[in-house]
Image: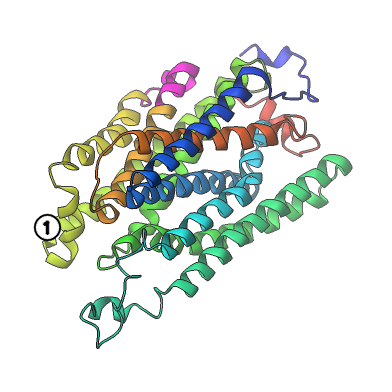
Amino acid sequence: MGNHNHTHNFTEQFTFSGKLKTWTLIAIVVGILATAFGLLTGQQERTFANLLLMAYYFTCVCATGLFFLALQYVAQAGWATGLLRIPQAMSRVLPIASLVLFAVCAAGLLTHNLYHHWNGEGLTDPSSPNYDKLIAGKASFLNVPFFLTRLAVFLGAYSFFAWLFAKYTKAQELEGGLVYHDKNFKWSAIFLIVFGFTTPIWAFDTIMSLEAHWFSTMFGWYNFAAMWVSGLCVITLIVIFMKKAGYLTWINENHLHDLGKFIFAFSIFWTYIWFSQFVLIYYANMPEETVYFYKRWEPEYLPWFWLNIIINFAAPLLILMSRNSKRQMNTLMFVCILLLCGHWLDYYMMIMPGTVESHRGFGIIEIGIAIGFVGLFTFLTLNQLTKRSLVTTNHPFLQESINHQI
């Protein structure tokens, strides 16, 4: 590979300034303006649906950074050590992302612009003309105080783990040895159990309960797969961006190959769950189940429905199949950007049909809010990356990562 003879500068410090910083701030302003535009033109439902989409996406990607870290610790994996600083930075943004998501959900509940399928007037009151037996049966779980409590507990727990990992990692860099590495290992195992049991409930609450008459037991894993692929794409994109800017000299095509394999594998996994959920409902053909897909087969959504599968399954399958393509920065970059757009479309298809009754469409609100959140994520994550050197020094597997070859 030729990379091994280079002397690497492990005190490499990332500086976030100039044009890039300006562009991220412009993007945030665009997002704020698009939100204001939506609210002022009377398209509250649509604006809130888009805010939920991007706040959830933003939080999922940050949570994936944390999941990636924990996974590397528990698997005792060496290959990724040289790029751990990136998922670390993402996980440090998680508390802010969590606050944004919580605020959007709370505001949506209070203004009745989100979750009106179970949060409407008189749905659980037998004497009301709006009484809905099905919703009343779910009321002990789907009620505003319990909903917001669950959301706060889950996001609070994830944020706590993010803080804990950062604390131990910093201590390890200062003191060396294996004490803090072992602590990270132990807490990662605990985190993975907590995360595994709570992510499906988090997805049920935030996304599935938008259409509370319908449910799918696969929905949590379907969301988890989407989140994991998106997070991997973001990690890969940041690595490539850093490489192109002259940083991360110790990362080579072998590391990219591994990231590419992950993206390829879990895109297939996402498709497997998507198809399993779809085909079971399709051939059972029971009205209470098919109602979900029936909405998504309306003429305005049907093209998006199929495009979702083409982007998120066919593209990574056909482009990333060969060994060589996973080692090419530009090919990987293209697939990552495509998949991030594809999973935005995936969340769009989960959220919009059941939330937005009037003013449907695709335009300024969707694009503007998405740009705003991309700007916010980029600004916060790159800002975190400037805090310390770009490599986790004193990590016991660092040498293994530098000499990684496949």
Instruction: Determine the secondary structure under disc 1.
Output: helix
> Residue, x 73% and y 13% (percent of image)?
5
Instruction: Characterize the local packing of mark 1: few (<14), some (14-19) or many (20 or more) Cα atoms within 10 angstroms.
Output: few
Residue at 12% x, 42% y is 299
Q: Position of residue 104 (x, y in %)?
A: 48, 54
Q: Is residue 255 visible?
A: no
Name the main secondary structure of what is drawn in magenta.
Answer: helix
Say which amino acid is labelled 1. Tyr
Q: At x 72% / y 54%, what residue is drawn?
A: 164
> Residue drawn at (56%, 64%), measured in percent from left and top?
152
- Res 224 visible: yes
Tag 1 residue: 283
Which quadrant of the structure image shows residue 252?
top right
Quarter holding the N terminus is top right
Colouring chosen for the image of the structure: rainbow
In front: 344, or 339?
A: 344
Question: Is residue 326 one of those drawn in magenta?
Answer: yes
Residue 294 placement (x, y as % from top left): 15, 54
**Along the horizontal axis of the image, is 184 left or right of 329?**
right
In the displayed orientation, state which residue is furthest to the right.
175
Range drawn in magenta: 320-335
User: Where, by quadrant of the figure, is residue 201 drawn?
Assistant: bottom left
Q: Is residue 360 magenta?
A: no
Q: Is residue 29 above or below residue 112?
A: above
Q: Quadrant of residue 341?
A: top left
- Residue 196 position, x and y percent, is 50, 60
Count of numbered tags? 1
Instruction: Tell which of 90 and 117 is nearer to you.
Output: 117
